[in-house]
Amino acid sequence: MGDDNITIDPWGSAQSTDYSRIIDQFGLTPFQPTSVTSPSKLHRRGIVFAHRDLDVVQEAQRKGDPFGVLTGLMPSGQMHLGHSMVVEQVKWFQQQGGDVSIAVADLESQATRGISLSKGREVALEEYVSNYAALGMDPETTNVYFQSRRPIVQRLGFQLGKRTNLNEFESIYGFKGETNLAHVQAPLVQVGDILHPQTEEFGGLRPIVVPVGVDQDPHLRLTRGLANKTNWFNLKDASSMGLLVSLSIHDENAEVFGQLPNGRVDREKVGGVFSQIVGALKDLGFSDVISNPKQGNVHIPSATQRDKHNIRMSLLHLERQLGGLGLLAPSSTYHHFAVGMTGSKMSSSQPKTTLFLNDDLATVEKKIKRAFSGGQSTVEEHRRLGGNPDTDVAYQYMMYFFEEDDSFLSEINSGYRAGTILAGEMKQLCIERATVWMGHLHEMRDQTAHLVQDFLAEDAQ
Ligand code: TRP
């Protein structure tokens, strides 16, 4: 119908898997597995396929500077394999030195799914946090909190709501006049989730990365836009060479920036701000800084793209000293969705489409046996034509979840295509690995049950 744009609805059941179009349309950066040290299987296999500003996090990682990881969980339904993928990524960042915040989206699930706060708490602890512990997250550097019990999360959402409007919500989420306002409030609370770890109280200014499926990207676009709109200083490429810092004047900083109520400008105040900018830049080692308070900018001719991040951080610190929020736009990574076991979308409301983390081993076996297969309909045809591992659930689940060994995977991939491995044999391989993986998880859940409390932040006790 002429409109071939993808709309991503985080609450909808439709799910686009046209990942290259998503990259183009939403301006994601393709992920290069070689760009990370000690890549996980999700990185090596192209399952993590795109990011925004991951380099900022990687630089912090390299330098040993602090950085944080944030994720959120909806305390409704049971935790399944799809959820475990996010945990694997969070755990990977944690092992690289990141501190972890986990939002229990109890306000969101109350408003959008009718789950009471007390039920949400119960589900979060029994279904989710217990599995996070069993999957090997480190309680020492993990803080699980509840949206309903962390006022700063709600306050930030409210405060930043001022910098967006219904038109923007319409273009990001496709909202219409009949949209329930819970769907307006929930994203604002999620903005608070994503940005609050940078506040002084929760760890201070540092890069925060949010690993998500593409269904959550609308929230990241919103959050990044809002963070940028609050910034007091802009940093952009100068038209000649180098970088240019300018003031972004709005009502929260008008006074500090010397904008008098009568429309005049307090030159002395402006001069003071400019010398603070120059001072900050000199501290970073730039000696050739040209300050033009009259034109409203500071030019750093010798600065290059590689200096951008350091300069930005230093300006955010200065903004905070002057009374601003000083928020850095979050980084994010995106992963492909594993196919549902029936061949359609994986969904917690349809038990046949996934394995729940507490499915018993007999159920695991039964579901894999019945799973959608990329094999041919008869053995004879399969031997002749070969199977398709790209649509074969048993193969896909080994690739996404159960098999660490890349060379084994590529062996069975070509064996399947060549028709030497049959569909039933592929399922048997998957059942063996799934049984080991699930068996181990269940054992770990018993062993780590006593740690659940240790994952909770002070305000979540
Ligand atoms: N909206 C998310 C979901 O539907 C849950 C969530 C809340 C979240 N806050 C978050 C996810 C922050 C990532 C980051 O699952």
Image (tube, rainbow, N blue to C red):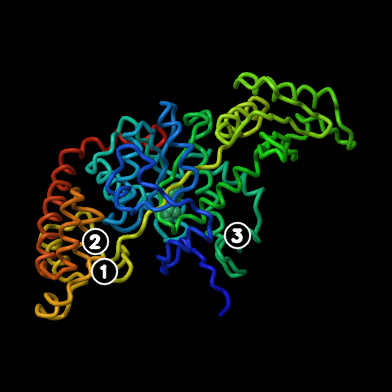
Rounded to the nearest whole Å, what is the CA distance between mark 1 and mark 3?
A: 36 Å
Q: Mark 3 sits on what residue? A: 169
Picture disc at residue 391: 1
The picture places residue 301, in percent across and down from the top left corner, at 69, 30
Say what amino acid the circle numbered 2 marks.
Answer: Gln
Front residue of 283/232: it is 283
Q: Left or right of 248: which side holds 200?
A: left
Ligand 1: does it lie within 8 Å of the C-beta at label 1? no
Quadrant in which the C terminus appears: top left
Say what amino acid the circle numbered 3 marks.
Answer: Phe
Say what amino acid the circle numbered 1 marks.
Answer: Thr
Label 2, residues with CA under 10 Å away: few <14, some 14-19, many ≥20: many
The picture places residue 117, in percent across and down from the top left corner, at 40, 50
Front residue of 202/39: it is 39
Q: Nearer the viewer, mark 1 or mark 3?
A: 1
Q: Earlier in the sequence, mark 1 or mark 2?
A: 1
- Residue 10 visible: yes
Q: Quadrant of residue 214?
A: bottom left
| Tag 1 near tag 3, CB within 8 Å | no
The picture places residue 316, in percent across and down from the top left corner, at 61, 31
With respect to residue 361, does 244 lie above or below? above
With respect to residue 264, does 396 lie above or below? below
Picture disc at residue 298: none
Quadrant in which the N terminus appears: bottom right
Rounded to the nearest whole Å, what is the CA distance between mark 1 and mark 2?
A: 7 Å
Mark 2 residue element: helix
At a point 62% along the width and 49% down the height, the residue shown is 161
Q: Left or right of 270: which side holds 301?
A: left
Q: Mark 2 sits on what residue? A: 396
